Amino acid sequence: MPMNDAPIGIFDSGVGGLNVARAVSAQLPRESLLYIGDTARSPYGPKPIADVRRYALEVLDTLVEQGVKMLVIACNTASAAMLRDARERYDVPVVEVIGPAVRTAMSTTRNGRIGVIGTVGTIGSRAYQDMLEVNERLTVFAEACPRFVEFVEAGVTDSPEVLAVAEQYLAPLRHAGVDTLVLGCTHYPFLEGAISYVMGPDVSLVSSDSETAKDVFRQLVSRDLLASPDATPRHRYEATGSSADDFVNLANRLMGREVREVQLVQTGAIDLPR
């Protein structure tokens, strides 16, 4: 199989990255995808950055061993923890989710006040704040929303409890008068209804899925890695957890019947210098 028909490898701590996979598939319907959800160690958000870095590189190693032509880190916490490591470690192009969302937020805001929500790990890393604050006319307000991932991974996206928690997390950002809110976690678009309801109609929500897919498109074209015109796309899903059924059921609850079967994989353990 020529290199161009090799799959694109997409990785997240759980099901959040399926948003990114869907966006990539919509823009590049001939491409094969290989998706791994690291469900055995999800959620990444509250874990120490050094651990997230190790887990993420173990999963990316697994994708590279399976012959992918590109890596997409569809997890903000992992992108913040080890993007530089990944670019040095692998010969294939690496696309992540933070830069595309930052660029979109910069071009979307009208009043220069941007909110960012994400996991404890992502917000604590200041990855978004540092990239946005390069532009001196922007003021950035960041809030960690740790329970949002728990809701999504439990398949709960529209309960009264979700709304109540969203009201609580987002109150400081409403108070700050942001006009653009970056959903700095690939799980959060599944909660877009509740987040948009709480923030109100005048606040633009920016998520990284479609913007990341555009980055994937650009990289494949510029590196001459597009799938051949007669390629038959295959979409494979893998999870590191103990139950393939749990992953399939949750994916179908969130996405409709797009994910039909999941293989369980074991990542190799790696030792990284501290």
Image: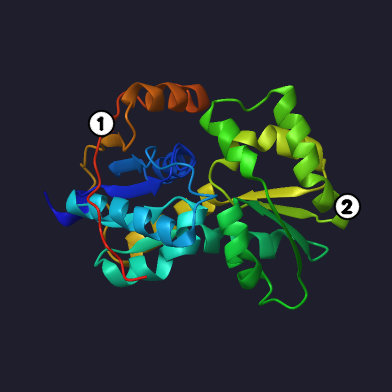
Mark number, residue 1: none
Residue drawn at (32%, 26%), measured in percent from left and top? Answer: 244
Q: Is residue 81 visible?
A: yes
Residue drawn at (75%, 23%), measured in percent from left and top? Answer: 160
> Would you say 176 lies left or right of 210 here?
right
Q: Nearer the viewer, residue 76 or 201?
A: 76
The quarter in which the C terminus is drawn is bottom left
The x, y position of residue 89, in whole percent, is 28, 68
Mark number, residue 175: 2
Instruction: Identify the residue under disc 1.
Output: 263
Q: What's under tag 1, amino acid-wise?
A: Gln
Residue drawn at (54%, 25%), measured in percent from left and top? Answer: 155
User: In the rendered image, which quarter is residue 141 located in?
Assistant: bottom right
Q: Nearer the viewer, residue 219 or 20?
A: 20
The x, y position of residue 40, in whole percent, is 37, 38
Mark 1 or mark 2: whose residue is earlier in sequence: 2
Task: Give SS at disc 1.
Answer: strand
The x, y position of residue 117, in whole percent, is 67, 52
Assess disc 2: are there few (<14), some (14-19) or many (≥20) residues with their C-alpha within 10 Å of its C-alpha.
few
